[in-house]
Image (cartoon, grey):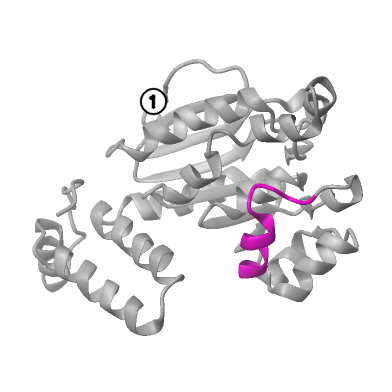
Amino acid sequence: MRPSQRITEFQTIIYEKRGGIGYVTLNRPQVLNIYNVQMRDELYQVLGAMRDDREVVAVILGGAGERAFCAGADLSEFLSAPSPAIARQVRWERDVWGLFLSLPQPVIAAVHGYVLGSGIEMALCCDIRIAAEDARFGLPEVSLGIIPAAGATQTLPRTIGRAKSLEMLLVGRWLDAEEALAAGLVNKVVPRKDLLDSAEAMARKIAALAPVAVRLAKEAIRRGSDMSLNEGLALERHLAGLLIETQDALEGVRAYVEGRSPNFQNRDCC
C-alpha cells in the first residue's frame, strides 16, 4: 500500500490521498460527527480542491468513531444565532451539496451507525453507498418543526421513491441497513469491521479504469438523469465521441485483443 499523504490539518474532517483515492473522514466523533459551520467550510475547501485534482480518481467519504457516520446538524448553532432563519442561512451559504454533486470523480459513502438528517443528505450526494450492518437511517427534521434543506426532499424520492420517502419524513420512519438495501438507498451491506475494506476494494477497481472514461461515464448518468431519453442519448453519443480519440481508448482495445491488462495513462479530458 502506498504511503498516505495527509493534505492540510483540519479540525472537523481528515483528508488524505492514497493510491489515487481521496479519503474524506468526518471527524467530530465526540458529538456523533454532527455537521456544523466549520465542517461546512472545511468540506467546501477539500471538495473544491479534489474537484480539480487529476491525481484523485475516486473518493471515499466516511465518519470517525464507532457510533455514527453523521447524526445530523449541530442544533446548538441554531440556539446561539440571532434567529433560526439566520442560523440556517449561514449554514448553507457555501454550497457544499452542489460541490458534492459536481465532483467528476465517483464518490463512495461508507456509512455506519447513525446516518441522520444532514448525514443522509450527504450520503445521497454520493454515487455509491456501502453501509455497515449497524447503520440506521432517518430524517427527523419535521419532528423539529423544520424540513430538510440540503436536498433530501429531492434526492431521497429519486433514490427510494415517493411513498417510502414520505414515510421517513412524515412518520419519522427509520430504516436499518437491510431495509435501506431493499429500498435501494444503499448498494451493499457489510459487517462493520469490513466497511472500509469494502469501500477501498470498490475504489481500487474504479482507480484501475481509464480515468477520463470514468469521469465521462459519471457525467453521462448525472446529466442524463434530468434529460429526456433522446437528449440523454445525444449526450452519450457526444461523450463517447470525445473518448474514442483518446490514447486510453486505443490502449483498452489493444489490451483486450492482446489478452493483457491495460495500462491507462490519460487523466486529462478531451
Residue placed farthest to the bottom in the image? Answer: 230
In reply to whether residue 155 is colored magenta, the answer given is: yes
Mark 1 burial class by Cα count in 10 Å: few <14, some 14-19, many 20+: few
The residue lying at 71 percent from left, 35 percent from top is: 88
- Residue that mark 1 sits on: 3
Q: Can residue 34 be seen in this view?
A: no
**What type of secondary structure mainly makes up the magenta span?**
helix
Magenta stretch in the rendered image: 147-159
- In this orientation, which residue lies closer to the viewer: 91 or 220? 91
In reply to whether residue 227 is colored magenta, the answer given is: no
Q: Is residue 97 visible?
A: yes
Q: Position of residue 232 (x, y in %)?
A: 35, 76
The residue lying at 47 percent from left, 54 percent from top is: 202
Residue 2 vertical position relative to residue 101 in the rendered view, above or below: above
**In the image, 44: left or right of 210?**
right
Image quarter (top left, top right, bottom left or bottom right) of the C terminus? bottom left
User: Callout 1, which amino acid?
Assistant: Pro
